[in-house]
Image: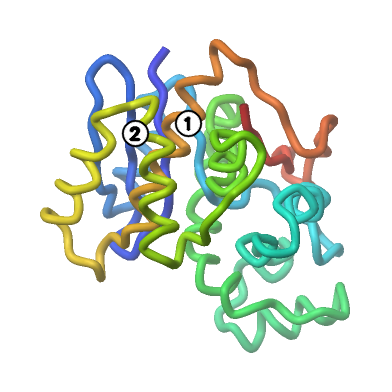
Amino acid sequence: MKTAGIDGCKAGWILTTFDDEPSYHILRSDKELKDALNSYDLVFIDMPIGLEDEVYTRECDRLLREKLGPEYASSVFSPPIRPALHAPSYVEANMQSYEYTEKKLTVQSWNITPKIKTLDALLIELPELRNKVLESHPELLFMKLNGGMIYQKKNTKKGIRHRLDLVNHHEPIAADFFREIKEEYRRNEVEEDDIVDSMALALGAKHAEEKGIKTLPENPPLDSEGLKMAIHYV
């Protein structure tokens, strides 16, 4: 089974795989993302899949915040509701969000909305992707790799090193990839946390066949487009 992990980055997306021929790729266009998603049997991706129509916070996001605890809950953004997804500006998206939920859309969520729109459109266009392109969250995967806790935040050098060490314990090539990606790409294309996040997602996807996949919540609901609203982990 071909597996990969994908995280968003400023250049587009960073894909890592720890299959028989480990590799990494920067996907700079929607076509490259589409081709990549079609090329793998299982992909863990850190991007919201499935959107509420009138509820501000998805159940999976609420449960994930509880799981991560108060120190790390801020890493979970509530995505825009579907009526606000195609708003032409933050102001209008904010107005639509408030009209339906009485809560404003965060700037962080608006900043990733273009990527949410891209992935959402692909999953609607290609229903065959829905069972193999699964939303996950790196911090939850790191927590599981570290025995149920996280010691350092990833916006620190210690936090990045801690996360890299957790992946490197299972995939020793991870340290080489980390160094090579930093040398090959500028920080305004791919940041350090993007690299380690894509590695955690790749490791999770690789382990999924052997260990099985769990979801938050256990019985995920579908959104109005038939997309599952769940966080997947092993």
**Residue 133 placement (x, y as % from top left):** 53, 33
- Which label is found at residue 186? none
Seen in the picture, residue 109 relative to 90 is either above or below; the reply is above
**Residue 184 placement (x, y as % from top left):** 12, 54
Q: Is residue 52 left or right of residue 147?
A: right
Label 2 Cα crowd, 10 Å radius (few <14 / some 14-19 / many 20+): some
Quarter residue 209 falls in: top right
Q: Is residue 155 left or right of residue 35?
A: right
Q: Which residue is mark 1?
A: 43
Q: Could you tell me which residue is drawn at 76 percent across and 38 percent down?
A: 216
Seen in the picture, residue 78 relative to 142 is either above or below; the reply is below
**Residue 100 placement (x, y as % from top left):** 86, 74
**Residue 180 placement (x, y as % from top left):** 15, 46
Q: Could you tell me which residue is drawn at 19 percent across and 50 percent down?
A: 181
User: Looking at the image, is mark 2 or mark 1 nearer the viewer?
Assistant: 2
Q: Nearer the viewer, residue 162 or 136?
A: 162
**Circle 2: residue type:** Asn
Q: Could you tell me which residue is drawn at 61 percent across and 51 percent down?
A: 48
Q: Which secondary structure, mark 1?
A: strand
Query: What's the distance in space between the residues labelled 2 and 1, CA to CA?
Result: 20 Å
Q: Give the mark nearer the N terminus: 2 vs 1.
A: 1
**Circle 1: residue type:** Val
The quarter of the image holding the C terminus is top right
Q: Which residue is mark 2?
A: 168
- As drawn, which residue projects farthest toward the left? 184
Q: Nearer the viewer, residue 86 or 140?
A: 140
Q: Could you tell me which residue is drawn at 33 percent across and 36 percent down?
A: 16
Quarter residue 116 falls in: bottom right
The quarter of the image holding the N terminus is top left
